[in-house]
Amino acid sequence: MKRYLALLPLYFFLVINNTSAQKNGDTIINSFSDRIFPGKGYQQLGDIKWKFKTNGKIFSSPIAKNGVVFIGSEDGFLYAIEEKNGKEKWKFKANGAIHSSPSIYGNIIYFGSFDGYYYAVNTTTGKQIWKFETGGEHWYGEIGMWGMKPNDMLMDDLWDFYLSSPVVYKDGKAASVLFGSSDGNIYSVDVKKGSLNWKFKTDGPIHSTPVIDKNTLYIGSWDAKLYAIDCKTGKEKWRFVTEAKIGFKGIQSSVAVANGMVYFGARDPHFFALDSETGKLAWKYDAENSWILSSAVVVNNIVYVGTSDTYALLALDSKTGKELYRFRTSGYVYSTPAISGNTIYFGDFTGNFFSLDMLSLGKISNLISTDGRKKHAAKVLKNDKLDFTYASHNSDLSQYKENKKVMNEFYKLGPIVSSPYISNNTVYFGSADGYFYAVGL
């Protein structure tokens, strides 16, 4: 894809049970903390079981519990939907778009909104328990971003799709909710009351979702740094600095922690493996000028992660960073994969959703397409591939407004930046076409 300064975007994100909270029956299901689900062998995608229409784009990723699946939408609602039939159980209205993904603790679901609040809502009734006010939530922006015109205009980064998703940390009987904010802070608040425990200030907005491992919180910031923070005290353990160049700055992905290592991608554009205790670099992978907004999944010593401009799902050796293979799609891969058995599920920015056989070295797969892709691909795509210049119809891409027009063309395809969740032999994901899809396996 060609962009001005090459406009070059999570989630994401999602999870199964955190057994550390099982003692008193309060199950934790945290966004982006565990992307490996039960399953056997390779399972192709079946038919769409149902789809649920919201009135806004969906960038949030779903989560499910007790036969109900939850998803946020740009229309400002968090929806609770019956898994068996796609019928709405309840919906909760925030006063701003919901671009964060939810996490669950017991019978409480947590999420954030562009109205500047993070919410705790009862999973059964949809009633608010508390809300916590941050210093404000917004898209990342710069004046005259990347040299685009007009050079005195504050411009939203068109690829900053997500807000940070809250996750639950349990220490004995105490529990807290941890999340980042556009105000640059990492917050820890009481899980039941929403009162502040501590906050930690970074040098940029935080739209990455925290991941917790062994009492340490790992989170990236738009200041291009990855932080390791003590969950109990809010004190910094270490930080790792990625490069900050025009058009190549910031961390939007969440980390994966495995084998004593922390794995994550950045815009700079590289993928990194760090020692989880010290933050020391073990290796880094050159992503060929592709941002990495997708969060990684590690299984059997292989790292799986999506890329932007190379349109790929990568399989990397977790010990060395060597590329084992890549599976090419038709557009950017910002969706964080979900793995079940020998199958990887993920979407791309053209509205295709894939099931890939992990053992086939990228050779066996099938896909389904969003309604938007089926309707608009012939007009928006070039030879079935995303092409920024082609979609611009030779307009002046030095103008910010022209880049926004191209993005609006892409949105017609129903891009998938929502990360899939698997429950009851069904995979769930949202799309920028406003639909929430349930696909049988």
Image: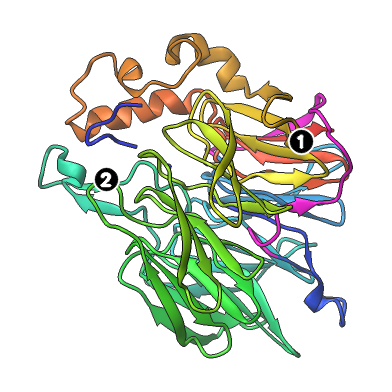
Q: Nearer the viewer, residue 179 or 122?
A: 179
Note whether 201 is above or below 29 in the view shown: below
Note whether 323 is above or below 365 in the view shown: below
Amino acid under disc 2: Gly
Question: Position of 394 compared to 300: left or right?
Answer: left
Spatial CA distance of label 2 from label 1 is 36 Å
Q: Is residue 142 visible?
A: yes
Q: Is residue 112 visible?
A: no
Quadrant location of the N terminus? Answer: top left
- Where residue 415 sits: x, y (%)? 53, 31
Image color mode: rainbow
- Where residue 357 sits: x, y (%)? 75, 32
Residue range (magenta): 30-57
Quadrant location of the C terminus? Answer: top right
Amino acid under disc 1: Leu
Note whether 70 is above or below 394 in the view shown: below
Circle 2 residue: 247
Q: Nearer the viewer, residue 301 or 304?
A: 301
| Residue 267 magenta-highlighted | no
The secondary structure type at the circle numbered 2 is: loop
Q: Residue at x 31, y 32 (%)?
A: 404
The secondary structure type at the circle numbered 1 is: helix
- Where residue 112 sits: x, y (%)? 53, 62
Question: Position of 95 compared to 296: left or right?
Answer: left
Quadrant of the rendered structure where residue 394 is?
A: top left
| Residue 50 magenta-highlighted | yes
Circle 1 residue: 359
Q: Residue at x 49, y 27 (%)?
A: 331
Mark earlier in primary sequence (2, 1):
2
Overall secondary structure of the magenta stretch? loop
